[in-house]
Image: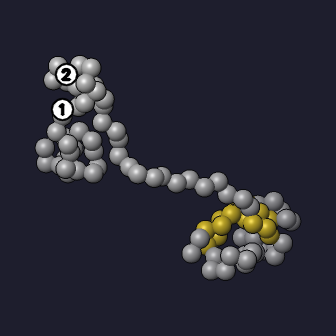
């Protein structure tokens, strides 16, 4: 069930509402007017996750572009040193 943003045509109040029918326009919670309209909302999404590993090597392999640090078993960090990794 999506949350839509609405604006009242009578009082100008903007509000969000969880609706079951996408064509439904709920009454204004401020003035109870039935004259409301759906607003266009910005969409935010995140694909993937986690931080990327540094491209530089810390073991003296300059120029190779490969990192020699151990891979983290934890999806919550990239360094392997958070409390949930146990490292």
Closest to the observer, 44 or 25: 44
Residue 63 found in image quarter: top left
For the N terminus, the quadrant is bottom right
Q: Residue furthest right?
A: 10
- Which residue in the protein does label 1 denote? 68
Residue at image x 67%, y 80%?
A: 21
Residue at image x 25%, y 24%?
A: 64
Q: Earlier in the sequence, mark 2 or mark 1?
A: 2
Judge whether 56 appears above or below 10 on screen. Answer: above
Crowd tier of the residue under label 2, counting other residues whose Cα lies within 10 Å: few below 14, some 14–19, many 20 or above: few
Q: Is residue 39 left or right of residue 63?
A: right
Residue 57, x across and y down, in percent: 23, 25
Judge whether 45 appears above or below 53 on screen. Answer: below
Residue 4 found in image quarter: bottom right
Residue at image x 64%, y 70%?
A: 17
Judge whether 25 appears above or below 59 on screen. Answer: below
For the C terminus, the quadrant is top left
How many numbered discs? 2
């Amino acid at each position: 069930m999506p949350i839509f943003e609405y604006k009242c045509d009578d009082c100008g109040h903007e509000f969000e509402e969880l609706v079951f029918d996408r064509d439904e326009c709920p009454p204004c919670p401020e003035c109870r007017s039935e004259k409301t309209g759906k607003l266009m909302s910005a969409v935010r999404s995140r694909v993937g996750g986690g931080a990327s590993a540094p491209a530089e090597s810390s073991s003296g392999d300059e120029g190779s572009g490969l990192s020699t640090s151990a891979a983290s078993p934890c999806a919550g960090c990239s360094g392997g040193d958070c409390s949930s990794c146990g490292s």
